Image (spheres, rainbow, N blue to C red):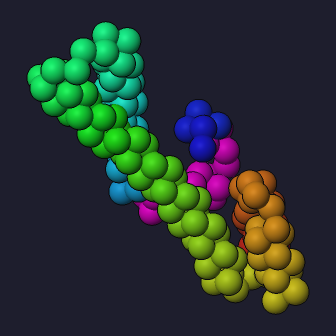
Amino acid sequence: MNFYRVEQMPGFIKTEMQKIQKAVQPFMKKTVIYRFLAIPLAAFSLFNLAAFLFHASADRESLISAGIFALLAALGLAFFKEAGYQHKQIQKTVHIYMLNRIKKSEILSEERKSSYARQIKEEPFAMRSFVEFLTEEDRRKKMY
């Protein structure tokens, strides 16, 4: 979610986006940390492991070093995979938040709420439908 674009949105949308950001903040923090650790660790280890393969000395010290670099590369790749899992959790949390927010609406009819819920379930990037929902809800709120 582009923070610059959120700042340009109307207040009622900005408020909901801030609530979403607050809900996913723990996952975002973990994702950033895991990726920050994964990329340099895996790259450094794989580079050194490749260098050991080209030198191909079979003494005990080289094998231990190669084993350590292989272990560090595996750890880096595991961090990268965990970052991907955390990213999926972010998407799931946002999705659940949007669906719950639609269900809580007391302004729109059940038919409109189910229509928006269906759109959000079907679309991979459902933010557009959620913004449409918030806009319609705000418009109807102002009518009453």
Along the viewing direction, whichever of 76 and 120 lies nearer the viewer: 76
Q: Is residue 97 left or right of residue 44?
A: right
Is 11 magenta? The answer is yes
Along the viewing direction, whichever of 54 and 23 lies nearer the viewer: 54
Instruction: Find residue 33 and report its horizontal and vertical position in percent.
Output: 32, 41
Res 62 quadrant in image: top left
Q: Relative to 25, does residue 75 appear above or below in the rendering?
A: above
The residue at 61%/79% (across/down) is 100
The residue at 36%/18% (across/down) is 53
Instruction: Find residue 58 and report its horizontal and vertical position in percent.
Output: 22, 21
Residue furthest left in the image: 61
Instruction: Find residue 73 and report its horizontal and vertical position in percent.
Output: 33, 35
The residue at 24%/15% (across/down) is 57
Is 15 magenta? The answer is yes
Query: What residue range appears in magenta?
Result: 6-24
Q: Relative to 1, does residue 42 appear above or below in the rendering?
A: above
- Which quarter of the figure is the N terminus placed in? top right
